[in-house]
Image: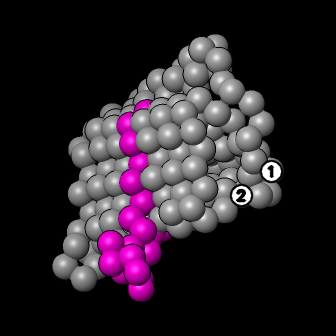
Amino acid sequence: MRHDITIAEFNGKAPCIHPSAFIAPGCRIIGDVEIGAEASIWYNCVIRGDSSRVVIGARTNVQDGSVIHCDGPLPGRPEGYPTLIGEDVLIGHMAMIHGTVIEDKGFVGFSAQTMNGCVIEREGMLAAGALLAPNKRIPARQLWSGRPATFMRDLDDRAIAALQLGVAHYVANGKAHAALYDGSAEG
């Protein structure tokens, strides 16, 4: 049973959510949105694919209260700014992701914001509270922080491994939370 979740078609486009994904109560998922296997969308997130598309890859998690949106066609940019999030991505609580590409194993800290045209390359990291200004690119394995965000340091193998432990934690935690709502949890 789904408790207090909105999954709605918009302009003939309906969300496509893999059956193994966890969608927490309070979420609003509208329009052209695709969510991959074992992804987790946590409590009170809003994902709106009403003007372009939003893709969230396998095992990616979008933590509580985050907002993900996109922009449709604009002058000089007929494709608009879809939001394309790869696999094994961590997105912290209350993040705002708008018209951004986040490659596999990327990271966005809690309360961080990205704007149209931004790219976070594979294993790139935007720190908590940071603002990535329009059309900025975080190269692979770099940490950026601040408002506006700027380069802080390169990430070593240990930092990347810690992020991937976070991905595994959220896959398992999503399954445990899903059991609370599908009647399979003991109580």
Eyeballing the image, is 25 above or below 134? above
Instruction: Report which residue position mark 1 lands on.
Output: 146
Q: Determine if the magenta segment contains residue 135.
A: no
Number of disc labels: 2
* CA gap, disc 1 and disc 2: 7 Å
Instruction: Tell me: 172 left or right of 20.
Output: right
The local crowd at label 2, few if under 14, some if 14 to 19, many if 20 or more residues have their Cα within 10 Å, is many
Residue 127 picture quarter: top right
**Numbered disc 2: secondary structure:** strand
Q: Height in image: 40 above or below 28?
A: above
Residue at the bottom extreme of this rendering: 75
Residue 146 is at least partly visible in this image: yes
Residue 98 shows in this picture: no
Which residue in the protein does label 2 denote?
A: 131
Q: How is the image coloured?
A: one colour
Is residue 143 or residue 136 the one in the foreground? 136
* Residue 88 on the magenta span: yes
Depth order, front residue of 77/59: 77
- At label 1, which amino acid type do we have? Gly
Q: Residues within 10 Å of mark 1 (few under 14, many from 20)?
A: some
- The residue under the point 42% across, 85% down is 75
Is 93 left or right of 4, judged from the image as shown? right
Disc 1 and disc 2 in contact, CB within 8 angstroms:
yes
Q: Main SS of the magenta segment?
A: loop
For the point 64% across and 14% down, the residue is 158
Label 1 secondary element? strand
- The kind of residue tagged 2 is Leu
Q: Which residues are magenta?
A: 64-89
Residue in the picture at 29% in, 55% down = 34
Residue visible at 30% across and 44% down in the picture:
36
* Farthest-out residue, right: 146
Which of the two residues, 8 or 2, is positioned nearer the viewer here? 8
